Amino acid sequence: MIRSTAFNLYAYTLTLLAALAGIVLAPIPSPAPLRALLQGYARAIRWGMRWIGGMTVEVRGRQYLQKEGPPCSPASITPRSTASCWRPTSRASPWSPCTSCSSCRSSARSSIAWR
């Protein structure tokens, strides 16, 4: 209970600071400062999860991920193949990858487990 409360305070404070910094950096035309801010935010949250919350991240199925090129996601699929690669399945998980293209099959086999 104490660790979860400490992590929540840390995460909310960090989120507030990152949001304020993002508001300041948003008018800059280059995406590099916002990208650096978000990467730093993600690293800081993972650090807090590990040291404050005692959680670790285990990636399973890394051997099934593509070695090169973008991962299969709605943002990286060409508009021509969007309808065939991503389709609504249920209310709990509104979008899921198809199993017809090799890229979607490999990303469906990989998963992240929180301990």
Image (cartoon, helix red, strand yellow):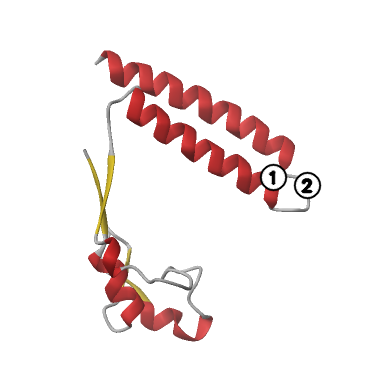
Residue at 40% in and 35% down: 46
Q: Looking at numbered disc 2 in the image, what kind of residue is underneath it? A: Ile
In the image shown, does 24 or 60 lie closer to the viewer? 60
Residue at 54% in and 43% down: 39
Nearest-to-viewer mark from 1 and 2: 1
In the image shown, does 23 or 33 lie closer to the viewer? 33
**Any mark on residue 28, and which?**
2
Mark 1: give few (<14), some (14-19) or many (20+) Cα within 10 Å: some
| Residue 92 appears in the figure | no
Q: Looking at numbered disc 1 in the image, what kind of residue is underneath it? A: Pro
| Residue 102 in which image quadrant | bottom left
Quadrant including the N terminus: top left
Question: Is the Cβ of the residue at disc 1 closer than 8 Å to that at disc 2?
Answer: yes
Residue 51 image offset from top left, x and y in percent = 35, 24
| Residue 22 in which image quadrant | top right
Asked whether, in this view, residue 41 is left or right of residue 96, the answer is right
Residue at 59% in and 27% down: 17
Name the element at disc 1.
Answer: helix
> To which residue does mark 1 refer?
33
Disc on the earlier residue, 1 or 2 = 2
Asked whether, in this view, residue 94 is left or right of residue 23, the answer is left
| Residue 30 appears in the figure | yes
Asked whether, in this view, residue 47 is left or right of residue 33, the answer is left
Instruction: Tell me: residue 81, above or below residue 88.
Output: below
| Residue 83 in which image quadrant | bottom left
Quadrant including the C terminus: top left
Mark 2: give few (<14), some (14-19) or many (20+) Cα within 10 Å: few
**Any mark on residue 65, and which?**
none
Name the element at disc 2.
Answer: loop
